[in-house]
Image: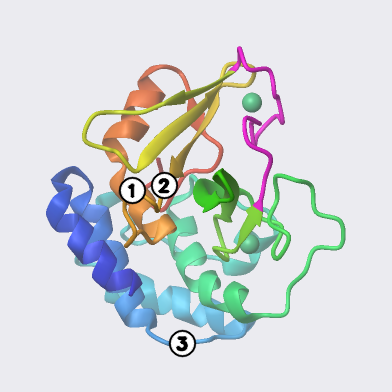
Amino acid sequence: MNAARARLLAGRHPQSAEVLLFVAAAYELIGEARPDFAGAQVLAERLVQSLASIAPEPLRGAVPDVAAYFQAPDPYAPSSVYARLALEPWARHAPLQMLDPRPNECPRCGHAPQLGVLRPAGNGDALFLACSLCRAEWAFRRGTCPECLATDPDAIQFHSAEGWPHVRTQTCDACRACLHLLLPEAEPAIIPHIDELALLPLGVWAMERGYRKVWPNLAGL
Ligand SMILES: [Zn+2]
Ligand SMILES: [Zn+2]
């Protein structure tokens, strides 16, 4: 499902095609694998070797350390892409639960949110944050910055762009963080963490205005 969606989006969004095709190949290779924590390291090394010819340039020759990523993630290190891909199936299925998670960390694995999803609820929408590692979603207060937890309506703004009816970009002028919110109502086939990889032009738009993502995606943006 992940791989097919990534290939479909690669055809629609040429600017993001390289990373989407790389991610599609990675998910095809991972398949239904459910590695344990040690197995995730083996899987990461296999991904590096198998995907060398299609990996975006900075990712070639990366040496992943999945334990280091899980304990103290550095999402800007090229090797982190492989660590995240290999840890995802483990983190999805392992019996993880945070004892006292902060509102902006994943209640399953404790990692940072990648993006938000606005799902229809009652007369409006409810906001869920989606984890950057295990992809779990958890409810989060709307109009709040997931980085600094500011709620000042003058600081928190929402932006939409022509041609992207299923996306709102939330920015915070208190800490300069941003993240994309996806609206499945406008694009039912969405797989949040895959579709978010196709938003490169919106990420560049935010970056040029001095915002940085709460957590970079597998494209490093
Ligand atoms: Zn998680
Ligand atoms: Zn903020």
Give the labeled residue for mark 3: 33
Q: Residue at x 40, y 40 (%)?
A: 221
In reply to whether residue 91 is colored magenta, the answer given is no
Where does the magenta region start and end? 139-155
| C-alpha separation, residue under disc 1 versus residue under disc 2 | 6 Å
Q: Residue at x 56, y 84 (%)?
A: 39
| C-alpha separation, residue under disc 3 versus residue under disc 1 | 32 Å
Residue at the front extreme, as displayed: 123
Residue 74: in sight, yes or no?
no
Give the labeled residue for mark 1: 186
| C-alpha separation, residue under disc 2 versus residue under disc 3 | 30 Å
Q: Quadrant of residue 208?
A: top left
User: What is the secondary structure assignment of the residue under circle 2?
Assistant: loop
User: What is the secondary structure assignment of the residue under circle 3?
Assistant: loop
Q: Residue at x 23, y 29 (%)?
A: 162
Main SS, magenta region, reads loop
Dot 2: within a 10 Å radius of its alpha carbon, few (fewer than 14), some, or many (20 or more) residues?
Answer: many
User: Residue 151 versus residue 58: which sits nearer the camera?
Assistant: 151
Residue type pointed to by label 3:
Ala
Is 193 on the left-hand or right-hand side of 36? left
Give the labeled residue for mark 2: 183
